[in-house]
Amino acid sequence: MKMVAASDNMKSRGQDLLVLLLFPVFFILHESNRYPGLVPAGVQLKLLATYALVVLIMYLVALVIMNDRVKAFLTSICLILFYFFFGSYHDVARDVFTGSRLSSYSVVLPFWLFLLSISILLIRFSRRSFGRLHIFAKMLLAVLVLLETVILLAGLLSGGWKKNFLALEFPVNKTVMVADSLKPDIFYVVFDEHTSTRVLREQFGYDNSSLDAALRANGFYVAEQSTSNYNFTPFSLASTFSMDLLKLPA
């Protein structure tokens, strides 16, 4: 009887793990639908394998901590939510609390870690079985994956992803000469949200000079005292290429 019970328990844990692995599938499908055609299939598969490994490690750790199948499942959910959605929450916080310390990592990260710790402790020491919550979480994950799959199939069948020019392969005829073909190509490199070497050194104590040296060694000019016209990348780049500030509505 003990062997049968142990076998059933292992089977149930395996089923829970398969459900948890729907999280990486949902995340990949969601990003594919959000940016159709932009991420190569090979990259998506590598990301899926990496995320699946992370989820597996989280579940094994949760099993050790909880020693209860349902509680381990719910603890894994908490860890996965933190892993996959902390970045999205931080982006929202920066939009809502622009320029405020409430959007800084020194506030947001401890806040999330506090919520994560409280959630895990409540699950660990609660006397509840969490049976209904366990079933609800499994059903919700299945529904989310199903919805993203339907959206993906609808996009593929309608050909809507082809509207994204970056998803297409354009034939390039290198034999065609244009008037300024003999002039040198210009590569304008912008490290989005990456501050200057000077600021990294003065404010964070980090030496980033090797990157500047590598760029200079390859013939690049590094603007050491550059500043941005806007704190929004599309506006900043648009004003740079227009060589003027944007005429935004008041």
Image (tube, helix red, strand yellow):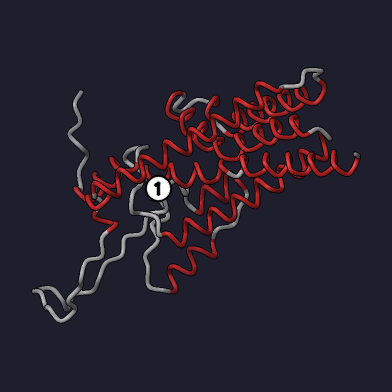
198 left or right of 121 in image:
left
Residue type at mark 1? Answer: Ser
List x then y, in percent, for residue 194. Answer: 47, 49
Residue at x 58%, y 56% (from the top left corner): 49
List x then y, in percent, for residue 136. Answer: 60, 25
Q: Looking at the figure, which quarter contains the C terminus? A: top left
Residue that protrudes farthest toward the front in the picture: 1
Q: Looking at the figure, which quarter contains the N terminus? A: top right
Quadrant hosting residue 3: top right
**Label 1: few (<14), some (14–19) or many (≥20) C-alpha neighbours in 10 Å:** many
Residue that protrudes farthest toward the right in the picture: 2
Residue at x 46%, y 29% (from the top left corner): 92
Question: The residue tagged with tag 1: helix, strand or loop?
Answer: helix
Residue that protrudes farthest toward the top in the picture: 127
21 to 77, vertically: above or below: below
Between residue 1 and residue 189, name the one nearer to us. 1
Quadrant hosting residue 182: bottom left
Quadrant hosting residue 126: top right
Between residue 138 and residue 232, name the one nearer to us. 138
List x then y, in percent, for residue 10. Answer: 78, 44
228 left or right of 107 in image:
left
67 to 198, vertically: above or below: above
215 to 126, vertically: above or below: below
Residue at x 82%, y 36% (from the top left corner): 65
131 left or right of 168 in image:
right
Residue ID for mark 1: 32
Residue at x 55%, y 45% (from the top left corner): 24
